[in-house]
Image (tube, rainbow, N blue to C red):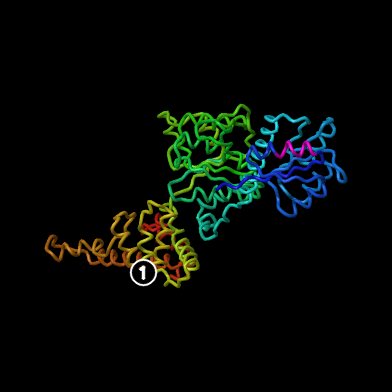
Amino acid sequence: MKRKRRLLIVDDDPSSQEWLTLFSEQLGYRAEVVESGEQALEAFQRRRPDLVTLDLMLPGIGGLDTLKAIKALGHDVPVIMLSGHGHTRVIVDALRLGAADFLRKPLEPEELKLAFERALEKNRLEREIAYRRSQKPRPINEDRALFLHSRNPKMRAIDDVIDHVADTDVTVLVRGESGTGKELVARLLFERSGRSQKPFVKVNCAALPSELLESELFGYEKGAFTGAQRRKLGKFEIASGGTIFLDEISEMKPGLQAKLLQVLQDGEFSRLGGSGDVQAEARVIAATNRNLEAGVRDGTFREDLFYRLNVVTINIPPLRDRMDEICPLAEQFLRHYARAYGKEPEPISDTLMHAFQHYAWPGNVRELENLMKRLVVLGSEKPLLQEIAARKVQVRPAPSASESLSELERFMTGEVDRVSLKRIAREAAQVAEKRLIEKILYRTRWNRKEAAEILQISYKALLYKMKDAGLADSAR
């Protein structure tokens, strides 16, 4: 059974008390009547009402002083002031002190009913905004954000761009394959900005049909369509003063793209069913894993919106183009999920790390994270090795000794009648040298300086040998 709203009537006139009580009970309220400001404050201490009607002229504490005392208690209960006078200065003072409305006596039933509805709806929206803004975005997990603080030149360049543009209001377009960390970049832009104490609101443009996405972004007024029982705030309003992150922006339909373009151009929008404009004070960060230029060419993405979004672009390279990050990322994920699940897994073996280094990573960092989570939960590397082998997606496989010694094999089988011992020895030495260098690089997480010291060669010599063995590409 739905709880009746409680109305506190503060009025010393018996006829007004009786009329307000009967009227409010007909509307479904449970009325409580008090005759003075002192009694009103006592009633608040007993049980907070949902709504208050407060007469301006009261014995003892006057209406304005009572209103001030109610607001000083920290209550967000809407208060409607009533008076038979209604001088402009008094109305202004009442509204300045926090009154939801000011009505003159004698009261019109329809006018009072609308005042009740407006006050309660405004109060509901204010509480909703306050609640949503109090929900701080989850802090960026340093384990997951590690790849943005690596020694990889491409990622260092991204980190520099974030530092330069974070504290501005320019629109940023984050591009990259699925799983590369586009949302993390958006959150870093937010955390390093002057908006970091305001809301961070994420909207997945691919998760909702176009009609629902429009109401989700911009909200709607009561009665805007069938089922719209009350006003709904859009994500742009909730993110006001903060940042709105539009993920998978390429999935937005052209009709809705036009409305988003208006927001970016004019800084305002209108709710569905609304007649007035609402100021859009949220910074926009968009992300996509699609080729927007191709969308512009085939007509699925507006060219003018593309240029509005593309003020600053951050391109995140796939994991296969920064293989030197696999070792540190894998170990960070291992430690993170070991703590999360209370496990003590074994260190990652050279065999598994070798498989990681020669895997194409179609799912990028997210795939690596999921594999490490599975390793912690299962406590065995075998399922991971089997899974990687089953996918048969490898890049730059290292040549085996048998491939390098194929000339010797052909001689032994009689395919050729001559063989160069020097060449066979040189090729075998190259294979052995490559394997050793590769193993040391894995052990040092591709720290070339440290690897050169272990191998007792100069840094330049190591770089030359890596290039000669085809290992330089693997480190990119």
Q: Residue furthest right?
A: 60
Q: Is residue 109 above or below residue 69?
A: above
Main SS of residues in magenta: helix
Image x and y of residue 18, in percent: 74, 38
Kind of residue at badge 1 = Ser
Image x and y of residue 306, in percent: 50, 33
Q: How many marks?
A: 1
Image x and y of residue 446, in percent: 45, 62
Q: Is residue 197 magenta?
A: no
Q: Is residue 16 magenta?
A: yes
Q: Is residue 29 visible?
A: yes
In-front residue for pair 450/12: 12
Q: Residues within 10 Å of mark 1 (few under 14, many from 20)?
A: few
Identify the residue at horizontal 62%, vertical 35% (top origin).
280
**Quadrant position of residue 432:** bottom left
Is 310 on the left or on the right of 133, as rendered?
left
Q: Residue furthest left?
A: 414
Q: Is residue 164 visible?
A: no
Q: Residue furthest top?
A: 275
Q: Which residues are magenta?
A: 14-21
Identify the residue at horizontal 82%, vertical 45% (top origin).
36
**Pointer 1 residue:** 380
Label 1: element kind: loop
**Quadrant position of residue 463:** bottom left
Quarter of the image for the C terminus: give it: bottom left
Is 47 on the left or on the right of 391, as rendered?
right
Identify the residue at horizontal 52%, vertical 29% (top origin).
258
In-front residue for pair 394/250: 250
Is 255 on the left or on the right of 59, as rendered?
left
Image x and y of residue 308, in percent: 55, 33
